């Protein structure tokens, strides 16, 4: 399988669908917003974008299955599966904000082998193939070299439906506010991940996530030299709903802090 050729086809696709997303954002009104759960929104734009992605990805790899957020195609295959979020940052999108992204990963058995995150607002396409490095609009990217948490900019997502660990989160947030360059909540996990990959953030953590939020971004971070784990230090960060990411220098101390706040 030619991973680079497939990645190039996916890049063309996400740019096409990105133009669609951009063109629809100003048409969003409160009447067309549907609620999937508490603070969990969806519009015809998410669904149409997903349909466009699935249709084309089926042509690119006819035998692959899909794990797609809006459930357009629920077929799972034994070897290859696309893991898709057609619009990561729906809350930003419906409030007229950026950033918002398209996130597409190709999984071979248990391993992610292609990751593409296209942040539509700034027209930035982040890509990676397994063992092939990570790129932003075709230029190689690397995580930052910052060594100290005290000199790091941290990204996170605020809990918005699962408040079971909110007290732990608030303690960790206070610590990072007081002991780093600051904390950002951009509203798109896929973008948070690729911003660690290109060195804009040193580290990122969040719980309550889904596989389509993180599958592509985690490969991009790893291929850029970063490290990823779940809240227990293990590898269940794609389907385990929680993730810790950092450049290789701050990762251990960042994990130790989060471990101290969550695993007590
Ligand atoms: C959400 C975004 C957000 C994160 C949420 C996700 P959606 O995805 O990634 O940053 O905090 O957990 O659900 O709903 O906009 O695709
Ligand atoms: Ca998402
Ligand atoms: Ca989404």
Image (tube, rainbow, N blue to C red):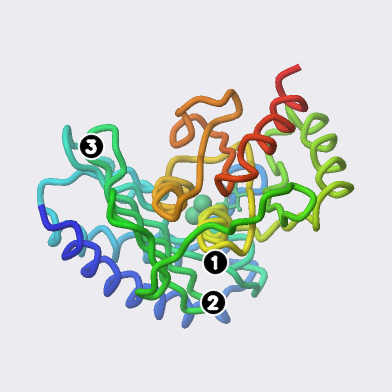
| Mark 2 or 1, nearer chain start | 1
| Callout 3: SS | loop
Residue 11: image x %, image y %? 30, 70
- Cβ of mark 1 under 8 Å from ligand 1: the answer is yes
Do the residues under discs 3 and 1 have CB atoms within 8 angstroms? no
Q: Position of residue 90 (x, y in %)?
A: 56, 60
- Which quadrant: the C terminus? top right
Mark 3–mark 2 distance (CA, rounded to whole Å): 31 Å
| Residue plotted at (81% across, 45% down) | 176
- Residue tagged 3: 76
Q: Nearer the viewer, residue 58 or 221?
A: 221
Q: Residues within 10 Å of mark 2 (few under 14, many from 20)?
A: some
Residue annotated with mark 1: 100
Residue found at x 22% / y 40% = 108
**Dot 3 crowding, Cα within 10 Å, few <14, some 14–19, many 20+:** some
Identified at 85% across, 40% down, the residue is 175
**Placement of 237 over or under 27, stated as above or below:** above
Identify the residue at image location x=18%, y=57%.
3
Residue at image mark 2? 121
Frontmost residue, 51 versus 176: 176
Which residue is situated farthest in the top direction here?
264
Q: Is residue 17 left or right of residue 109?
A: right
């Amino acid at each position: 399988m030619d991973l680079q050729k497939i990645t190039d086809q996916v890049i063309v696709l996400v740019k096409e669908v990105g133009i669609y997303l951009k063109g629809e954002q100003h048409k969003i009104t409160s009447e067309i917003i549907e609620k999937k759960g508490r603070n969990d929104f969806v519009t015809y734009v998410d669904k149409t974008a997903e349909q466009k992605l699935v249709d084309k990805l089926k042509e690119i790899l006819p035998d692959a299955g899909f794990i797609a957020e809006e459930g357009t195609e629920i077929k799972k295959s034994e070897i290859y599966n696309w893991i898709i979020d057609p619009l990561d940052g729906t809350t930003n999108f419906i409030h007229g904000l950026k950033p918002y992204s398209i996130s597409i990963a190709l999984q071979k058995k248990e391993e992610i082998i292609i990751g593409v995150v296209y942040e539509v607002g700034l027209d930035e396409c982040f890509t990676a193939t397994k063992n092939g490095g990570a790129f932003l609009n075709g230029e190689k990217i690397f995580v930052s070299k910052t060594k100290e948490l005290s000199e790091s900019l941290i990204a996170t997502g605020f809990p918005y439906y699962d408040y079971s660990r909110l007290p732990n989160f608030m303690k960790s947030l206070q610590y990072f506010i007081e002991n780093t360059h600051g904390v950002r909540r951009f509203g798109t996990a896929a973008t948070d991940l690729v911003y660690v990959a290109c060195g804009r953030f040193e580290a990122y953590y969040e719980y309550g996530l889904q596989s389509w939020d993180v599958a592509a971004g985690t490969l991009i971070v790893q291929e850029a030299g970063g490290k990823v784990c779940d809240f227990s230090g293990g590898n269940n960060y794609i389907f385990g709903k929680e993730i810790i990411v950092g450049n290789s220098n701050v990762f251990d101390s960042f994990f130790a802090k989060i471990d101290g706040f969550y695993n007590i």
